[in-house]
Image: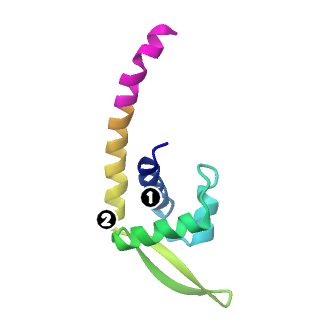
């Protein structure tokens, strides 16, 4: 898969993982595992990029005597998810065009 396409998809997957509730790194990886594999280094790189883009915010809270970073989606992050849904509809339309010959020959 094209690296830029995959990068954009992973960004939106991560935003979707925190859409309904704030979350932290290990839980995000665990929640995404049924859908895609992601290393911790990839996760934290994406989280930093999304924070810089103002699509999420970070807060630190103590949990079992340790500090844990919790990530919260912003309005810009929610808007990015909606933009992605619209973009994906276009990608699927293009896919159907590309594969229409395949279905005729089947």
> Is 66 a magenta residue?
no
Relative horizontal placement of residue 98, taking residue 40 as reference (left or right) = left
Q: Label 1 belongs to which residue?
A: 11
Q: Which residues are magenta?
A: 93-106
Extreme residue toward the front, this view: 3
In this rendering, the answer to whether 18 lies above or below 48 is: above
SS assignment at label 2: helix
Q: Which mark is residue 20?
A: none
Relative horizontal placement of residue 33, taking residue 78 as reference (left or right) = right
Nearest to the eye among marks 2 and 1: give it.
Answer: 1
Q: Label 2 belongs to which residue?
A: 76
Extreme residue toward the right, this view: 64
Q: Position of residue 72 (x, y in %)?
A: 44, 72
- Provide the major secondary structure of the magenta segment: helix
Q: Who's the residue at 49% across and 68% down the image?
A: 45
> Are there few (<14), some (14-19), or many (20+) residues within 10 Å of tag 1?
some
């Amino acid at each position: 898969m094209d690296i830029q396409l995959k990068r954009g998809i992973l960004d939106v997957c991560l935003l979707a993982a925190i859409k309904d509730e704030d979350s932290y790194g290990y839980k995000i990886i665990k929640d995404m595992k049924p859908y895609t594999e992601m290393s911790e280094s990839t996760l934290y790189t994406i989280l930093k990029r999304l924070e810089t883009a103002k699509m999420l915010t970070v807060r630190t809270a103590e949990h079992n005597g340790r500090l844990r970073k919790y990530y919260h989606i912003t309005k810009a992050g929610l808007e990015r998810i909606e933009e992605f849904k619209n973009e994906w509809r276009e990608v699927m339309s293009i896919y159907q065009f590309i594969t229409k010959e395949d279905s005729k020959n089947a």
